[in-house]
Structure formats: structure tokens, C-alpha cells
Image (spheres, helix red, strand yellow):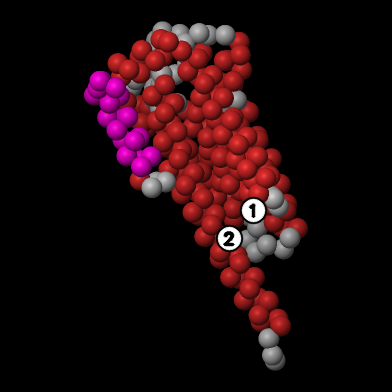
Amino acid sequence: MLVGLPAVLFALITWQVVDDGPLLGADRRLSRALVEPDRASELLSDLGNVQVAVPVLVLVLGYAAWRGRGAGVVRWWAAPLAAAVLMAVLPAFVVPVKEWAGRHGTSAVPPGTGYYPSGHTATAAVAYGGAVLVLLPWLRSALARRVAVGVCAALVLAVSYGLVRRGYHWPLDVAASWCLCAVLLTCLGLVLRRLSRSTSRTCSGTASRRTGPS
């Protein structure tokens, strides 16, 4: 469900955008009701800039790698590397769709195409979401994990609101990026879980060999 449903929704929204379907009428009306460019919305949208989101991810990945190495985790570099790779290849998922869809922007941005899906939303979701997924195993309490997830969700929603409010993107541009990144982050989570289980089995096997009878 975490992969299939968002993927279907992404395909549906993309179909509507490419074929100028009836959903775009509601999208335009919602945009007109929400757009009111101001400094606050611009600052919120800036949280999705590569210059802001990626350094946050790098800091968290560095911390996780440091904790893993200090704890003697086998392949301590694997989880941070997986999140870094996803961030690096994100344009390969977003840019081709932008070029294919060729959607024009709102009246608040210069004429041109390539606004669908929202790259800033995708950057924020993958950077902050990937950081949380890598950080979760190192948070000791359930409260700390809930706070981390909540902060991530708040940041992504803040970026999304800022983009729509400022008029940088249509609401469907942002919604499509949510769907796409839900798929990508779910896949990353599955990879991290597999790595965690593999590490646990390796550590268990090593302990068994050391403590078993000679």
C-alpha cells in the first residue's frame, strides 16, 4: 500500500496534467484562492532549496555514520550511503517527468514550462525524510522518534505551503511530488530495514563463533 497507492495517484495526476484533464480546473481554482505572494511564503519555500535541505541531510548522515562506526556496527556506512544515493539520483526521477509534462507555471512566475512535479517539494521530502529514516535507529525513546517524524512532516508541509502560497507551483505539482517521494522513501525504508536485519544476523553469527565451544 505504501508503494502501490502513491504510485497510482502519481500516475493519475500525471495523466490529468498531460491531457489537461478536468482535475486541472479544480487545481487552478484552488491555486487562485491560495496564492498571495509574501515574504513568509518565500522563506518557507526556501526550505526546499538544495542549499538548505541537502546540508541538513549530510549532517545527519555524518552523525549516523559516526554513531554506527563507534558502536562497531558492521557496514556502518551502508545506511547513510543508501540515503545519499537516493538524494543524488532524485533528479533522474523528477527531471524527465518535468520535460515530458511541460506544464506551465502560475501567473506569479515567469512564463515557461517544467513546473510539474515540484522539484523543491521532492528535494525537501527526500532530504528530510531520508535523514529521519537513517536517524531513527539511533533515537532511544519513542517520543524522540515521534518528534523527529513530526519535524520532518512539518518541514515538508511548510515547503509545500510556501510554494503554493507564493505561486511557485500549482497544488497538483506539490501533491504529485508527495506521491513520488512516498514511493521513494518507502523503498529506502525497506532497504534500510534489510540492511539492519543483515547486520543483526552478522553480529549474532560473530558473537556465536566467539562464544561457542572450541
Q: What amino acid type should be assigned to the residue bearing mark 2?
A: Ser
Label 2 residue SS: helix
Quarter of the figure that contains the C terminus: bottom right
What residue is rendered at 59% in x and 53% in y? 79
What residue is rendered at 41% in x and 36% in y? 179
Is 79 in the magenta? no
What residue is rendered at 50% in x and 8% in y? 36
Q: Is residue 21 above or below residue 61?
A: above
Mark 1 surroundings: few (<14), some (14-19) or many (≥20) residues within 10 A:
some
Residue 167 x %, y %:
47, 13
In three-dimensional space, the C-alpha distance between marks 1 and 2, rounded to whole angstroms, equals 9 Å
Is 16 in the magenta? yes
Q: Earlier in the sequence, mark 1 or mark 2?
A: 1
Left or right of 15 on screen, residue 1:
right
Mark 2 surroundings: few (<14), some (14-19) or many (≥20) residues within 10 A:
some
What residue is rendered at 57% in x and 8% in y? 38
Residue position for label 1: 137
Label 1 residue SS: helix
Residue 46 appears in which quarter of the rendering?
top right
Left or right of 175 on screen, residue 12:
left
Residue 106 x %, y %:
40, 12
Per the rendered image, the range of residues in magenta is: 5-23
Q: Is residue 204 above or below residue 170?
A: below
Q: Nearer the viewer, mark 1 or mark 2?
A: 1
Of all residues, the one furthest to the front in this rendering is 143
In the picture, the disc for residue 95 is none
Residue 81 seen by the camera = yes
In the picture, the disc for residue 196 is 2
